[in-house]
Amino acid sequence: MTERATLAPGRLSIPRVPALGSPLIWAGPALVALICCGAAVLGYITYAPYGSEAAFGIAVGAGAVVAMAQTLILASRPRLLEPLFGGLDRMYRAHKWLGISALVLMILHSQIEPDFERVVRETDLGELASEVGELAFNALLALIAVSWFRRLPFVGLEIPYQIWRFSHQFMGLLFAVIVFHQFFVDLPTGVDPSLSLLLNGFGLAGVVAWLHTEFLAPSLRRREFTVSAVTPHGDTTLVTLAPKGRAMRWRPGQFAFVRASEAGLSEPHPFTIASAPRADGSLSLWVRARGDWTRRLPGALRAGMGVQVEGPYGRFNFRKGGARQVWLAGGVGITPFVAWAESLTAADRQGIHLVYAVRTPEEAVGVETLAAAAARNPRFSYQVVASARDGRLTAEGLTQSAPFPLREADLWFCGPAGLKDGILAGLKAQGQSPRRVRFEHFEFA
């Protein structure tokens, strides 16, 4: 099972979404950036009569509030917005950069805090809003910094996931205090209320999104599953789950958030579903030990134990690709391709070649599914490249392996970014750059 964070029975009835190469997937990032910039411009224009320094301080503060509100909105994983970003992984990238932008803008606002003492009528409520807002502001800065620097640069130290997740959970509460500050802080009389209405609206939306994420979504979105089997395979474990009630519907290549509260692993982690939809609603997950949570999971799970699954998410769908496709998997990145291969039938007309890069042959998982797919569909082929046996996979090796020129094919990738970047650079040097490259970010963070 491909873990996405440091941080999907029957035919689906899921609306068509833009392909990863579609210009529409840039609509989401462009929209959130435009909203932040619009709030900053409106803030500057509104307070320009009080001097450029005061106007700039208000502008960066307004941008920070809107950026933070949008960060919380995207963290709620709204499915209606997912197509505008090209998938939840890219939505989380926008979430990350909105948080970083909010951090920078907050620092600027603290350094250029506008002084309206001479032009406002102070009230007790306004003074309280000012004081608690400053405290919440500084605490929020610290939590955003913890989230941003989860892996500390140069020293290689990683903040434990539990602390990192707590920082995310607590941000909404601090933001609610900042919204209180925004609502009641004393401001000059006679100022155009448009900015206040905008900030109050986004502030309330951010708080509502946080409340939904922390208190409503866990019970509304989760589906109950039972562990059918836990099968170790080296440092990777195959977990098979059966639905307790209504089965979840997913497309091959999608992922879901999994938590195992009964096993003492209550934090949700996102993983790729490693199987195609089945009549009984069961699904398979490959769990590779990549962190504390995944190292503990195989030993903590046992048959009959209950787990909770939320999903599906993701827009990784090879059926939206061209007539010729190369699938490239690195390590546990094979997971979506195993699901795709299981879903292949003789009716699928694409010519597909899969290359699966691992360190040793023993690390390869899902090979039986790949072999069965090749037997069903003569247009599907695959090759396992083990670096300890065959040498490191190169662009030249990839072009020699494929039964058609790569420049005439789409390349679908899942695995470490270094493998993707190296292969693409090599293909470009050979004049074999693929027609299109489709991938999902291996990690959200």
Image (cartoon, rainbow, N blue to C red):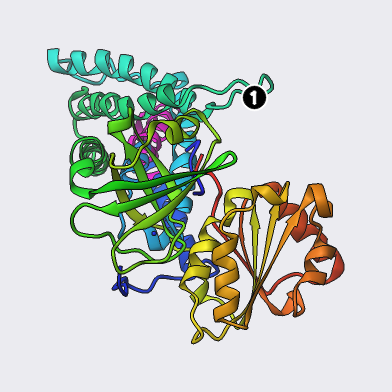
Q: Nearer the viewer, residue 39 or 353?
A: 353
Q: Is residue 197 visible?
A: no
The spot of residue 172 in percent (x, y) is 29, 30
Vertical side of 50 occupied by 76: above or below: below
Q: Position of residue 181 (x, y in %)?
A: 23, 24
- At a point 30% along the width and 60% down the height, the residue shown is 80
**Residue depicted at 30% across the width and 49% down the height:** 310
From the top left corner, tell me how far across and down residue 314 is, in percent: 42, 58
The total number of labels drawn is 1
* Residue in the image at 33% along x and 42% along y: 303
Give residue 297's quadrant in the image.
Answer: top left
Q: Is residue 41 above or below residue 253?
A: above
Question: From this viewpoint, which residue is outermost toward the left?
Answer: 124
* Residue range (magenta): 41-67
**In the displayed structure, does residue 235 sit left or right of residue 134?**
right
Which residue is at the front of the view, 396 or 120?
Answer: 396
Instruction: Give coordinates of residue 1: x percent, y percent.
Output: 49, 49
Instruction: Compare residues 83 and 306 and report the one nearer the observer.
Output: 306
Front residue of this view, candidates 171 and 315: 315
Q: Which SS class for mark 1?
A: loop
Q: Residue placed at 53% from the left, 44% from the top? A: 443
**Which quarter of the picture shows residue 187?**
top left
Q: Is residue 300 visible?
A: yes
**Magenta span contains residue 66:** yes
